[in-house]
């Protein structure tokens, strides 16, 4: 059964595993080491904000070659202006 994650705001651990492809043991490890933000309102079941998960998954995205060139040019321009 496929879940339509587009309509979900809150994810359970099963949802998160299906959404990311991560194993539940990996998710539990990342919650216990503080990497994954979660909510545990009744002290047993943990929940995740899909919005936060999406931001987390995209947080370490790579820059394109043109973005790197542009950032380098800006850096050199600012450095030369400071001299």
Image (cartoon, grey):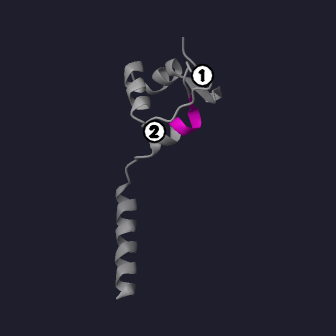
Image coordinates for residue 61, horizontal then vertical, percent: 40, 47
Q: Predominant secondary structure in magenta?
A: helix
Task: Classify 11 as above or below 34.
Answer: above
Residue in front for this viewpoint, 43 or 36? 43
Image coordinates for residue 75, horizontal then vertical, percent: 37, 73
Q: Say left or right for 39 vs 68.
A: right
Q: Callout 2: helix, strand or loop?
A: helix
* Residue with the mark numbered 1: 4
Q: Say left or right for 40 vs 29.
A: right
Image coordinates for residue 32, horizontal then vertical, percent: 41, 30
Q: Residue at x 40, y 79 (%)?
A: 78
Image coordinates for residue 37, horizontal then vertical, percent: 50, 36
Give the CA separation, mark 2 to mark 1: 18 Å
Quadrant for the C terminus in the image: bottom left
Q: Residue at x 57, y 18 (%)?
A: 3
* Outermost top residue: 1
Q: Quadrant of residue 23?
A: top left
Task: Classify 76 as above or below 42.
Answer: below
Disc number for residue 57: 2
Query: Neighbour class for label 2 at 10 Å: few (<14), some, many (≥20)?
Result: few
Q: Residue at x 39, y 86 (%)?
A: 81
How many numbered marks does the figure carry?
2
- Magenta segment boundaries in residue numbering: 48-53
Q: Quadrant of residue 8?
A: top right
């Amino acid at each position: 059964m496929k879940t339509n994650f587009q309509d979900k705001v809150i994810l359970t651990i099963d949802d998160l595993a299906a959404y990311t492809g991560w194993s539940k043991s990996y998710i539990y490890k990342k919650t216990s080491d503080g990497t994954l933000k979660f909510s545990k309102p009744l002290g047993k079941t943990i929940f995740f904000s899909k919005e936060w998960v999406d931001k987390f998954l995209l947080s370490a995205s790579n820059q394109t070659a043109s973005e790197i060139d542009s950032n380098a040019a800006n850096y050199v321009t600012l450095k030369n202006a400071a001299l």
